[in-house]
Image: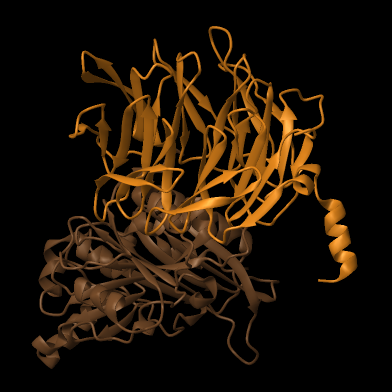
Chain colours: A orange, B brown
């Protein structure tokens, strides 16, 4: 590379890129979760790597193919792979196979305290403490998203045609169906557990108010919504899928019904692909199709800050360490930026 | 978007017993130096075991966009997006569908879903037909007709079990349904793989391969719901506005019965050739460079579908001729 170009690129680096570390893994980063002071990242080569400030990542060869899904579980991560394995992995590389589904993929995983959950095909499997055999919950079509509410009493399962919310009573799960035509993917409960929201196969998100099953259709996106995150006390549901981060207000009795979203973090013609709340702040990190990441307050009058410059590959994951000190950004080419969020760290 | 090129996807159809598994085993085991993933159906024939075989469940989803034709394979969207996260690049993906599945939702998935369209492209629809049983299957199962109608390539398999004059009959029967598919006669699906995979049959420039000498067909058939084809040629340039009005309205109102359509068009006042091809009401169209020197600038269109006689296609096409 010519020296001037190198200098120019150096000067185009963001503050976080200058003080952080960049790792080129060479396989798409598929998922990232925080476990205490480490950030675990799943990759398209089947590895899970544990990143920690000041040291090289520890690599665990977990799956044969792609790490499709990942969540944290006590001091471990749970992963699902396209090799049909549902695994519990510790950061020192210890792998426990919870179940092997053979040629069926493990598409989704979830956990709450000591309960481990995964889905393969149309079935959800639930392992509770001290029980070897999982409970199973059947659905009419392939499960595309799993989410517990904050108490672990309800489990939302998204699928074609809507969401099944399972409620745990006396060790038995009972189903309640929320229906909306189309295919539903990633699912989330609002922090106050009054709403559930899904990202659909179409360019829209859909929500229901749980107590009366009232529908909230949030449309107008130019592309599919691959990621959403709850931000601030209002709270806002911030979504990808547009050239901005689209922030829907979920306060009041009606939530976003009949209201317009706030849009922040505009990135020109690039589309947002991943969003992640900055814990405790009314601010969100937004990653884009070109690899750039902006930090923006949920306030249309404020200018966003460039966190990571373009890499040419779409941002596929962002994670923040539990003490809010480190940020990890991963993209589809497998480039990872790990950096301290604050200058004095 | 990503700089990576799109991975070609071959859709493999055919009734149980026609020889799809034989072909899939060849694709997976032959020393061809390429990396193919195969998406099979859970109810399909057994006997394939390989890391790159993925189980699918043929879930057909209706898109929530008001378009009645927009059924897609939801499982395919999920699986293709998973395969695209692999660290090692695939040379091609083969999707097997069961005998009774309608191939349209599979093809439509590549038109309708943006993520799928960004990272993969439909390469060709390949139908394996059993030379012994095809004639009776065409009578008994409309799915068999659709599989022939949709195909870009038809492997007429087990020809060693059929008399020569019966092969001619089966061949003619196929041609009545589908005049543009390439028919390859095989024993144990022994066609070279490069005639099956990597054909780029859905790229618009392949539409130019349509033979210009189709007869303006006047066909006979037994049932109104038979799948047939009709083709039209015009040496008079067409009026672009008239054509767009007619063709747009045709696909909107009759798109469910038109399985595939293709055409090369000579518009009045335009130097370039226009080509299009459609699957039901979804269509792809583009100018495709100037006409070759010294060759006739004739427009030609082909329709494959049901109930074509009641669509006034000939009259509609004639009305598009410029004054």
Q: Can you say which quadrant of the picture contains the N terminus of chain B? A: bottom right
Q: Residue furthest top?
A: A253
Q: Quadrant of residue B131?
A: bottom left
Q: Residue drawn at (65%, 38%), measured in percent from left and top?
A: A327
Q: Quadrant of residue A169?
A: top left
Q: Is residue B242 left or right of residue B51?
A: right
Q: Residue furthest right?
A: A4
- Residue B180 place in picture, x, y as percent: 37, 77
Give the vertical position of B225 relative to A300 (above or below): below
Q: Residue drawn at (22%, 68%), measured in percent from left and top?
A: B14
Give the vertical position of A200 relative to B82 (above or below): above
Give the vertical position of B16 relative to B257 (above or below): below
- Residue B87 place in picture, x, y as percent: 49, 62
- Residue A225 place in picture, x, y as percent: 54, 39
Q: Can you say which quadrant of the picture contains the C terminus of chain B? A: bottom right
Q: Nearer the viewer, residue A237 or B122?
A: A237
Q: Nearer the viewer, residue B290 or A184?
A: A184
Give the vertical position of A54 relative to B150 (above or below): above
Number of marks in picture = 0
In this view of the protein, can residue A52 be seen by the observer? yes
- Residue B250 place in picture, x, y as percent: 45, 54
């Amino acid at each position: 590379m010519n020296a001037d170009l190198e200098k120019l690129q150096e000067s185009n680096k963001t503050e976080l890129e200058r003080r952080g570390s960049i790792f080129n893994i060479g396989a798409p980063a598929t998922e990232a979760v925080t476990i205490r002071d480490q950030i675990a990242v799943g990759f398209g080569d089947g590895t899970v790597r544990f990143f920690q400030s000041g040291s090289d990542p520890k690599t665990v060869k977990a799956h044969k193919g792609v790490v499709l899904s990942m969540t944290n579980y006590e001091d471990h991560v749970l992963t699902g792979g396209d090799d049909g394995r549902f695994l519990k992995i510790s950061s020192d590389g210890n792998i426990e196979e919870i179940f092997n589904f053979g040629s069926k993929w493990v598409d989704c995983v979830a956990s709450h305290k000591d309960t481990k959950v995964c889905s393969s095909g149309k079935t959800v499997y639930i392992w509770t403490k001290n029980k070897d055999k999982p409970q199973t919950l059947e659905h009419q079509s392939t499960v595309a998203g799993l989410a517990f509410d904050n108490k672990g009493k309800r489990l939302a399962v998204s699928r074609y045609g809507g969401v099944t919310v399972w409620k745990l009573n006396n060790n038995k799960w009972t189903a309640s169906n929320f229906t909306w035509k189309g295919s539903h993917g990633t699912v989330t409960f609002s922090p106050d557990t009054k709403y559930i929201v899904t990202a659909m196969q179409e360019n829209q998100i859909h929500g229901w108010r749980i107590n009366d099953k009232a529908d909230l259709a949030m449309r107008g996106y130019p592309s599919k919504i691959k990621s959403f995150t709850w931000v601030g006390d209002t709270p806002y549901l911030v979504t990808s899928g547009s050239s901005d981060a689209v922030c829907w207000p979920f306060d009041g009795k009606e939530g976003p019904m009949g209201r317009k979203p706030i849009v922040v973090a505009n990135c020109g013609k690039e589309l947002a692909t991943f969003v992640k709340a900055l814990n405790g702040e009314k601010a969100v990190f937004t990653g884009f199709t070109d690899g750039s990441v902006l930090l923006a307050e949920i306030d249309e009058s404020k200018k966003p800050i460039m966190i990571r410059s373009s890499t040419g590959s779409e941002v596929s994951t962002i994670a923040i360490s539990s003490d809010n000190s480190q940020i990890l950004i991963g993209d589809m080419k497998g480039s990872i930026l790990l950096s301290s969020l604050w200058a004095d760290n | 978007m990503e700089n990576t090129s799109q991975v070609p996807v071959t859709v493999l159809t055919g009734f149980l017993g026609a020889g799809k598994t034989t072909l899939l085993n060849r694709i997976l085991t032959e020393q061809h130096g390429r990396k193919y993933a195969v998406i099979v159906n859970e109810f399909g024939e057994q006997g394939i075991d390989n890391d790159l075989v993925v189980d699918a469940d043929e879930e057909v989803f209706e898109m929530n966009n008001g378009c009645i034709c927009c059924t897609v394979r939801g499982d395919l969207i999920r699986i293709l997006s998973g395969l695209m996260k692999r660290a090692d690049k695939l040379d091609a993906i083969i999707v097997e569908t069961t005998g009774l599945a309608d191939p349209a939702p599979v093809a439509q998935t590549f038109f309708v879903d943006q993520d799928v369209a960004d990272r993969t492209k439909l390469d060709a629809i390949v139908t394996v037909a059993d030379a012994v049983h095809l004639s009776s299957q065409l009578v008994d199962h409309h799915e068999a007709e659709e599989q022939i109608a949709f195909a870009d390539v038809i492997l007429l398999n087990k020809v060693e079990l059929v008399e020569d004059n019966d092969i001619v009959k089966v061949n003619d029967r196929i041609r009545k349904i589908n005049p543009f598919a390439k028919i390859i006669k095989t024993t144990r699906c022994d066609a070279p793989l490069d005639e099956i995979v990597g054909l780029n049959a859905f790229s618009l420039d392949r539409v130019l391969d349509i033979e210009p000498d189709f007869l303006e067909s006047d066909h006979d058939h037994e049932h109104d719901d038979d799948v047939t084809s009709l083709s039209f040629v015009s040496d008079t340039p067409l009026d672009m506005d008239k054509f767009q009005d007619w063709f747009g309205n045709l696909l909107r109102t009759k798109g469910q019965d038109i399985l595939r359509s293709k055409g090369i068009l000579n518009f009045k006042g335009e130097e370039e050739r226009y080509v299009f091809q459609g699957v039901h009401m979804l269509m792809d169209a583009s100018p495709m460079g100037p006409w070759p020197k010294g060759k006739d600038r004739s427009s030609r269109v082909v329709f494959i579908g049901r109930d074509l006689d009641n669509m006034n296609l000939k009259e509609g096409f004639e009305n598009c001729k410029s004054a």
